[in-house]
Image (spheres, rainbow, N blue to C red):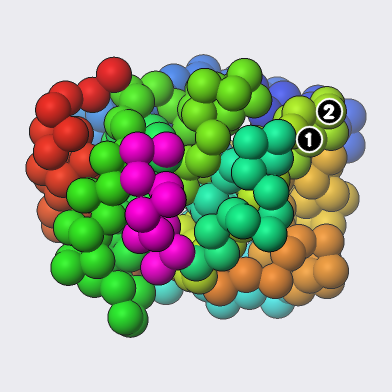
Amino acid sequence: MLYATGTQIQPLLDRFKRKYPFIKVEMPRAASIDVTRKVIEEYAAGLHQVDAYELSSYGLVVPRDQKLLQPFLSPELANFEASAIEPGSHWVSARESYLGIGYNTQKISARAAPKTYQDLLDPKWKGKMAISSLSVTAANWVGTMIVTPGLGLDFVRKLGAQQIRPYRVTARAVANLMISGEVALSPTTYLSHVEASRAAGAPLAWIAPGPVPVTDTSVAVAAKAPHPHAAMLFVDFLLSKEAQLMYRDLGYFSSRTDMAGDAPKLQKLVLENRPTYIQDYEQWTRLVQDIFVRGQGGGR
């Protein structure tokens, strides 16, 4: 029994089933927050049916803290960057994307585009930027600036004076607005979205302005998995180079060191690995609302 969020995993699941036809896989899907609530309620009721997760790291933090995950070892871990492995070995990043600056290349030239977080304070960008103000994307964007040396809360407040338009839609939807030309520039743009759109001919480009937050989907094992050996076989498969290359074909990146040349050189921040992440996340979410939503007279 696998709990997952999206349809992206289906091609990998099909490959896994072909490799191990003696394993039957069930996979109900739901949003991360709903999966987290579901497994907490199940364990409280004494129902232990989930074996493994393919879930965002932020969705795994609370189950870990409530001891609903078990640490694991895999021979594949030797091929992964340390930052991709949760400090207690409760999960490993299976696919990644990175949040940076996206822009419409028909409206902004590569030479004129902002290259750093500090460049976003240039008066020429005032009123010309937009962000996705939803949950994790916006919170981790603000959190990255808060924890980056030389930026911090004062910088975030200055950026709030740039009249950035907050859209209560996903970062993918904001990227679509950049493609249509309604938005020229967004500092909450995922590289995977830009790459997928560029491959289809869209006029988008992406810049890492400094440290960038990793938005990932990780693999984890339930604390009382009824089929732990099948779960670990699945973990080993998702972390294998074969599966990681399949994720890459879907537009995601890997932290496998033997695929390092496949992804851009970035200063990556895995904010979910911070021991205070839950408290930090709540604070950053409030800052998004205070500075970029209510501070702009409301969202769109």
Residue 201 bears which disc, if any?
A: 2
Q: CA distance from mark 2 to mark 1?
A: 5 Å
Q: Residue at x 29, y 59 (%)?
A: 143
Q: Is residue 114 visible?
A: yes
Q: Residue furthest front?
A: 124
Is the C-beta separation of discs 2 and 1 under 8 Å? yes
Let me know if residue 118 is in the magenta part: yes
Where is 111 relative to 99, above or below? below
Q: Residue furthest bottom?
A: 149
Q: Which residue type does callout 2 highlight?
A: Gly
Closest to the observer: 60 or 24? 60
Question: How packed is label 1: few (under 14 Cα within 10 Å), some, or many (20 or more)?
Answer: some
Q: Which residue is mark 1?
A: 198
- Which secondary structure, mark 1? helix
Q: Residue at x 71, y 34 (%)?
A: 106
Q: Residue at x 16, y 45 (%)?
A: 291
Q: Does 256 sit left or right of 143 as displayed?
A: right
Q: Is residue 138 visible?
A: no
Q: Which residue type does callout 1 highlight?
A: Arg
Where is 31 relative to 63, above or below? above
| Image location (x, y in percent) of residue 63 | 30, 46
Position of the C terminus by quadrant: top left
Where is 118 relative to 48, above or below? below
Which of the 4 image quarters holds residue 93? bottom right
| Image location (x, y in percent) of residue 155 | 24, 66
**Magenta region:** 117-128
